[in-house]
Image (spheres, grey):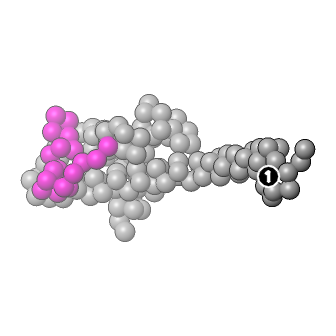
Amino acid sequence: MRSNKPGFSLIEIMIVIVIIGLMAGLVTVATTGYIERAKRQRARSDVATYSGAVDAFYLAHGYYPDNQEGLKALSPEFIKVIQNDPWGRPYQYVQPGKGGPYDIICYGADGKEGGTGADADITNWDPEVVELKHK
């Protein structure tokens, strides 16, 4: 016996749920690339900011912080809070550096030296970081 009440069948509801699931999956895949690019850009910005603060430290004190002091020497006089990189790991400070008097390094998504793409290292002597620092 069939009811004359309006409504949806179980099949219709399941089809709508599957379509919504597929659309959510597509949105997730599409936005993943943007999130990784945003994390890398934030790391570049942080490294440029910390590099400028290290230079200000040098101008104020006549020397660069040593490896023991690291970036902690900048707080609170030059930087209010030293944050971790976008992947939750601390930025590395090395004095003397390979690219100059000091290096500030973010090891990227994998947290290891080297790599490509999202795993590539970001340092204070990368051209993108140098450009940000001088803006």
Q: State the extent of the magenta-drawn residues as a range.
A: 67-84
* Left or right: where 133 falls relative to 29: left
Q: Is residue 29 visible?
A: yes
Image quadrant of residue 96?
A: top left
| Residue 58 within the magenta-colored segment of the rendering | no
Q: Is residue 76 magenta?
A: yes
Label 1 sits on residue: 8
Please tell me which residue is depicted at 53% across the width and 42% down the height of the picture.
118
Q: Main secondary structure of the magenta part?
A: loop
Image quarter (top left, top right, bottom left or bottom right) of the C terminus: bottom left
Residue 57 appears in the figure: no
- For the point 41% across and 62% down, which residue is it? 131
Query: Which residue sits furthest front?
Result: 1
Q: Nearer the viewer, residue 10 or 96?
A: 10
Q: Nearer the viewer, residue 94 or 88?
A: 88
Residue 28 in percent (x, y) is at: 62, 48
Q: Tell me: 75 left or right of 113.
A: left
Q: Position of residue 18 (x, y in %)?
A: 75, 44
Q: Along the horizontal axis of the image, is 15 left or right of 109?
A: right
Crowding at dot 1, Cα within 10 Å, few <14 / some 14-19 / many 20+, comes out as few
Query: Residue placed farthest to the left in the image?
Result: 61
